[in-house]
Amino acid sequence: MTMDRAVDMTIKRRVRLARVLCLGGVTLTLFVVMLGAWTRLVDAGLGCPDWPGCYGKLVVPDNATALAHSPHVPLDTGKAWAEMIHRYMAGSLGLLVIALVLLGWRLRRVAGYPWHIGLVLLSAILVQGAFGAFTVTLKLWPQIVTLHLLGGLSIALLFLWLYLRLGQVDGQAWRGYQRFRPGKLWLLVVGLLLMQLALGGWTSSNYAGIACQGFPTCNGQWWPAMDWREGFNLTQTIGPNYLYGQLHSEARTTIHVAHRLGALALGGALLLLTWCYWQQRRLRPYLLALLASYGFQVVLGIANVLLWLPLGLALAHTAGAVLLVLVMALTLWRLSNLPEMVGNRVRLGLKEEEWAHG
């Protein structure tokens, strides 16, 4: 084996190892997101009153130690362990990111290697760690809790995007990669999805999941009494304990109704997107997956309202949001690798008949 071939094989193995780490990162991030949702739903977000330890220790202490550290915060062992397990898993995710960045440093000179995505991922995990600390120290302040959820989803997307880009490097397909700029309709759909995710986090962090009873009406009315100013007051006071929420009923109803309206707007945009791009056969499976994951999420949302937010369904609703985000990312990736159209012609030299037949 020649020296050049040996070097090429070493690079290929390292790129494939980086892909494995990225795939593991996607999986672990989704697990951490779901574990965080479970911690929040069982009201264990403040199971440990300090950070990064728990009552000053790296493991959940006994009652005497906890009492000496925080005499005004009684120890609930179950909730404390729920919070600490979430932190352990998040810490493992940080170590995985560091390993991926160190590996990427050795591959940064490989043609087409997306070194910058690894740096963005490292920055994102550091910011997410800060959000985790602020979630505790600011006592579940809804703004931070919502940003913490969005941060977790962003990290999962960065892992996924890096995994897909590394597939191009591994397959030597990077030379044909076209930088994709989505059109206005795609930007609208992505914007609505981001808004809906933020509304979902805001609904959960303000305990507004069952502020509306019944469906499709809310508390027996199509337009119930609401307080939009208070419901979306982003300058809420820092200091109170936001466990179980601080908003009055009309403000929580406002948040819940806004989440429903956001779902309706997103659904309409997805239908329009599917109609506009249905002629692209390569995109059809992805468009159908988008509609299916959206429909699944709507059904779960309705069931949560009608059944008064049972733990299993609430977790499934979070999983449905994650699924919708990942499918959207994969759809955008597939679109970015289609031949670029100029008018009614194909830029990459394919005939219109070849485009039409996929």
Image: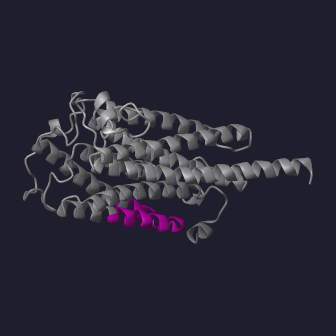
Q: Which percent across, then down, holds residue 317?
A: 32, 58
Q: In which quarter of the image is the N terminus?
A: bottom right
Tell me what residue is drawn at x 22 percent, y 37 percent. 242
Front residue of this view, candidates 214 and 329? 214
Q: Which percent across, then down, holds residue 87?
A: 43, 42
Q: Does the magenta stretch include residue 294?
A: yes
Front residue of this view, candidates 299 and 260? 299
Q: Does the magenta stretch include residue 55?
A: no
Viewer can see residue 251: yes
Q: Residue furthest right?
A: 2
Viewer can see residue 176: no
Q: Judge left or right: residue 350 versus residue 156.
A: right
Q: Quadrant of the C terminus?
A: bottom right
Q: Judge left or right: residue 72 versus residue 6.
A: left
Q: Judge left or right: residue 78 versus residue 106.
A: left
Residue 130 found in image quarter? top left
Q: Give the range drawn in magenta.
A: 271-296
Q: Which percent across, then down, holds residue 189?
A: 38, 52
Q: Which percent across, then down, holds residue 34?
A: 39, 53
Tell me what residue is drawn at x 68 percent, y 37 percent. 105
